[in-house]
Image (tube, rainbow, N blue to C red):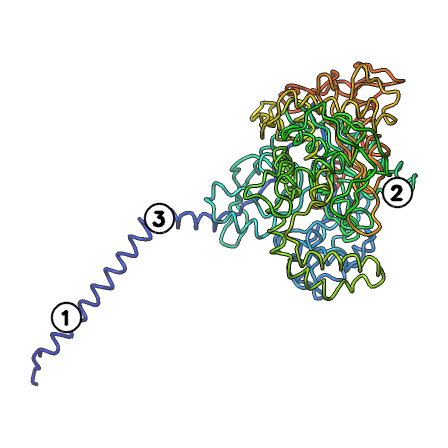
């Protein structure tokens, strides 16, 4: 037998094979080091996650209280009927029969219940907030505030309602001190969205504060201070085996209640303002006006604190507790109902009318007119070939600036606006025109948000020469097309369509020009000018306090669940008016004359003007559009001798300023100063202690506020009753019902 020797080729193969073995061993060793050393912590965490299941316990949301500690938003227990989408999907018909049976029990059609379960963005899902934007495996709340009978029926007949259960959940409650609604200020909650959850995934795990089961603030204070109010959820980890059976548990952390938000709102002032606003709307309607919406703002002129903000029409805040149905949601957006969801003090844009004349007066004082300058007040004033008239064609002798404010003479202000326009060069302006009224309006911070601590505040609109040019560049194609094609959508209103076409034709040619008529209308708060009621309240507060523009604020402080103040929010100065004391005094004189002998004299007849004098200005704004009625304004502050409060009200299509808005403002002052039978008594003031609370209310160790005792004339606060314990009692019954039962012996 011959033995073959080892050839060179065999040696090469052996070396290659050895190298391959060594490389595989090196790879395995490297991977071993990576898994056991470099990434040991990561895989240990994954292994831990595989053997644990997190159970999140929602934290109780913090309260919102008024400046005296009265609760505006608290929490209560509610019986909620929920559906498990996973269980329903496993059924042959997708749970349709179960939902139909539940619908007959609760009085809601089965298809509507099914629609509430459809995730937002999926086919046939309703628009937010009606769709479900929670997890696809998370129980979906279908019925809020269910009765005990319904909850027990669902639990007793578990085979009839598979996947349906009843549970007690904490929901927001609105005590409404003195009947104060304040729904727009407080805001509402809705489930967290997928987009919000995905956004926070980019943050470190320690900074991820939103959970799939969370409700998040969507408007008002609930939105602006959501992080502080929500608290920190508790967490229990269930230890499971490889078959996902629970073999133990450990508590990671207890839930922590959110902080209490102390606001500057006064519950009693808010209630009086809301009532006064609603009554003024009804008064205007009784006189033949449409009065389709209204707003009122009450500020402390010394620091910018908001004592009340009210909007009409309003709605019940409990509509958002649980699930809002389609009819309710559409009603909030219905123009025929006045769009109740719109918060008009900060979002309602209207021409200010004659309340703007204080700004034109300030501009006049800076540009050559003096307090004693007499200006003619004829019934009409010509700007080129355009005739501009006084309200109702009134006329008076030559007036000083304070008297012009008192009489609200339009032709005086047409003359001032036109004269300043001519100084700037008219249609051929100087290289740097002064635009005195425009810049004075900007100095009062009109045309920009006030900075109040709420979302979605409107900026308003103040139009000067440059804004007119910018708008022309944007709108020229539209105007020229309309000048050619007209407005066929108004074929049933030919006169209005013809008017709009004529305006479009004019703007197509020279819409970039700031004309003399534009300047004259600007001087009386008309034309393109739009403001919010809160902007005017801030402006009048600045006149009252000597020129300081305070940033309005609603939040004063946060208090922990143990009663400790965790954060104080200090007042913030937003700007200063460039007006001398003498110039401000001219405004004070004119505004006091308005109430004592001018356009608001009738409204304040019988008011104790000698004790707490009011300074204010009426406004009757002409609305752009076909067949729109005048809007009623009244802007004011008091006491005029030592100002503390600014109150501004507006009633859209409500008539003259004195006949509607001023009536609401007077009722607020009557309450603040305790006016009865023509005399003021601080002891009868609706403000506890006769004025705004300077500091913070006292809190007990359990986080509850020490609320001042209600006066005998005030509406008594409801006392707790056994009815409040009903949900907890029902939960106990449900728990007992679910206990395993012993079978009877046979």
Residue at numbered disc 1: 15
Mark 2 or 3 closer to N-term?
A: 3
**Residue 690: quadrant of the picture:** top right
Observer able to see residue 735: no
Q: CA distance from mark 2 to mark 3?
A: 76 Å
Q: Which image quarter: residue 559?
A: top right
Q: Position of residue 700 (x, y in %)?
A: 64, 20
Place of residue 682 in the rendered image (x, y in percent of width and height, measured from the top left): 79, 14
Q: Residue furthest bottom?
A: 1
| Lateral position of residue 196 relative to residue 146, left or right | left
- Front-lying residue, 54 or 179: 179
Which residue is under mark 2?
Answer: 289
Which of marks 3 and 1 precedes in the sequence?
1
For disc 3, the neighbor class at 10 Å (few under 14, some 14 to 19, many from 20) is: few
Element at label 1: helix
- Nearer the observer: mark 1 or 2; the answer is 2
| Number of numbered labels in the structure image | 3
Label 1 with label 2: CB-CB less than 8 Å: no
List the residue tagged with mark 3: 40
Q: Is residue 293 left or right of residue 262?
A: right
Q: Residue at x 24, y 61 (%)?
A: 25
Q: Residues within 10 Å of mark 1 (few under 14, many from 20)?
A: few
Q: CA distance from mark 1 to mark 3?
A: 35 Å
Name the spot of residue 329 as percent of width and height, x first: 76, 50
């Amino acid at each position: 037998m011959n033995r073959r020797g080892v050839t060179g080729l065999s040696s090469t193969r052996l070396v290659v094979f050895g190298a391959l073995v060594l490389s595989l061993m090196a790879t395995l060793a490297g991977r071993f080091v990576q898994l056991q050393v470099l990434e040991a912590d990561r895989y240990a965490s994954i292994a831990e996650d595989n053997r644990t299941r997190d159970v999140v316990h929602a934290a109780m949301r913090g309260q919102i209280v008024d400046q005296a500690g009265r609760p505006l938003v608290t929490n209560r227990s509610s019986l909620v009927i929920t559906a498990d989408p996973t269980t329903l999907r496993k059924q042959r018909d997708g749970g349709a029969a179960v939902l139909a049976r539940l619908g007959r029990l609760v009085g809601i059609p089965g298809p509507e219940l099914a629609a509430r379960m459809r995730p937002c963005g999926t086919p046939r899902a309703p628009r937010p907030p009606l769709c479900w934007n929670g997890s696809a495996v998370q129980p979906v709340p279908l019925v809020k505030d269910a009765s005990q009978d319904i909850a027990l029926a669902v639990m007793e007949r578990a085979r009839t309602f598979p996947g349906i259960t009843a549970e007690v959940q904490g929901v927001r409650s609105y005590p409404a001190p003195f009947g104060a609604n304040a729904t727009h200020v407080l805001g509402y909650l809705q489930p967290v969205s997928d987009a919000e959850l995905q956004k926070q995934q980019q943050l470190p795990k320690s900074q991820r504060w939103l959970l799939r089961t969370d409700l998040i603030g969507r408007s008002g204070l609930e939105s602006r201070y959501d992080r502080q109010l929500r608290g920190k959820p508790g967490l229990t980890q269930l230890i499971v085996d490889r078959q996902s059976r629970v073999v133990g548990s450990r508590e990671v952390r207890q839930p922590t209640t959110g902080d209490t938000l102390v606001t500057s709102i006064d519950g009693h002032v808010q209630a009086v303002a809301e009532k006064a606003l609603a009554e003024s709307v009804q008064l205007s309607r009784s006189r033949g006006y449409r009065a389709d919406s209204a707003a009122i703002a009450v500020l402390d002129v010394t620091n910018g604190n908001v004592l009340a903000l009210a909007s009409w029409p309003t709605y019940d805040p409990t509509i958002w507790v649980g699930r809002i149905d389609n009819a309710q949601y559409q009603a909030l957006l219905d123009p025929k109902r006045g769009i109740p969801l719109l918060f008009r003090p900060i979002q309602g844009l209207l021409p200010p009318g004659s309340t703007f004349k204080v700004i034109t007066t300030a501009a006049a004082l800076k540009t050559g007119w003096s307090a004693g300058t007499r200006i003619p007040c004829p019934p009409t004033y010509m700007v080129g070939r355009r005739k501009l008239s006084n309200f109702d064609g009134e006329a008076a002798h030559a007036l000083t600036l304070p008297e012009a404010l008192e009489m609200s003479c339009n032709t005086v202000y047409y003359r001032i606006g036109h004269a300043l326009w001519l100084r700037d060069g008219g249609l051929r302006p100087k290289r740097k025109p002064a635009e005195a009224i425009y810049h004075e309006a900007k100095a009062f911070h009109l045309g920009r948000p006030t900075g109040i601590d709420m979302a979605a505040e409107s900026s308003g609109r103040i139009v000067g020469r440059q804004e007119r040019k910018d708008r022309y560049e944007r709108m020229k194609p539209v105007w020229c097309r309309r000048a050619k094609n007209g407005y066929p959508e108004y074929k049933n209103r030919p006169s209005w369509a013809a008017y709009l076409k004529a305006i479009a034709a004019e703007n197509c040619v020279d819409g970039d020009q700031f004309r003399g008529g534009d300047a004259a209308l600007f001087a009386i708060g008309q034309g393109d000018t739009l403001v919010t009621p809160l902007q005017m309240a801030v402006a009048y507060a600045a006149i009252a306090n000597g020129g300081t523009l305070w940033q309005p604020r609603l939040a004063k402080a946060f208090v922990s669940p143990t009663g400790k103040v965790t954060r104080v929010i200090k007042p913030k100065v937003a700007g200063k008016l460039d007006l001398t004391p003498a110039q401000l005094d001219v405004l004070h004189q004119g505004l006091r004359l308005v109430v004592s002998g001018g356009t608001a004299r009738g409204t304040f007849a019988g008011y104790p003007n000698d004790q707490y004098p009011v300074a204010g200005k009426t406004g009757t704004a002409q609305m752009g559009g076909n067949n729109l009625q005048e809007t009623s304004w009244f802007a004011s502050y008091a006491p005029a001798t030592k100002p503390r409060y600014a109150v501004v009200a507006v009633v859209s299509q409500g008539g003259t300023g004195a006949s509607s808005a001023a009536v609401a403002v007077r009722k607020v002052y009557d309450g603040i100063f305790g006016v009865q039978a023509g005399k003021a008594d601080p002891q009868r003031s609706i403000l506890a202690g006769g004025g705004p609370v300077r500091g913070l209310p006292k809190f007990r160790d359990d986080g509850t506020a020490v609320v001042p005792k209600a006066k005998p004339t005030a509406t008594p606060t409801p006392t707790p009753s056994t009815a409040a314990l009903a949900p907890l009692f029902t939960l106990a019954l449900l728990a007992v019902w679910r206990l395993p039962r012993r079978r009877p012996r046979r």
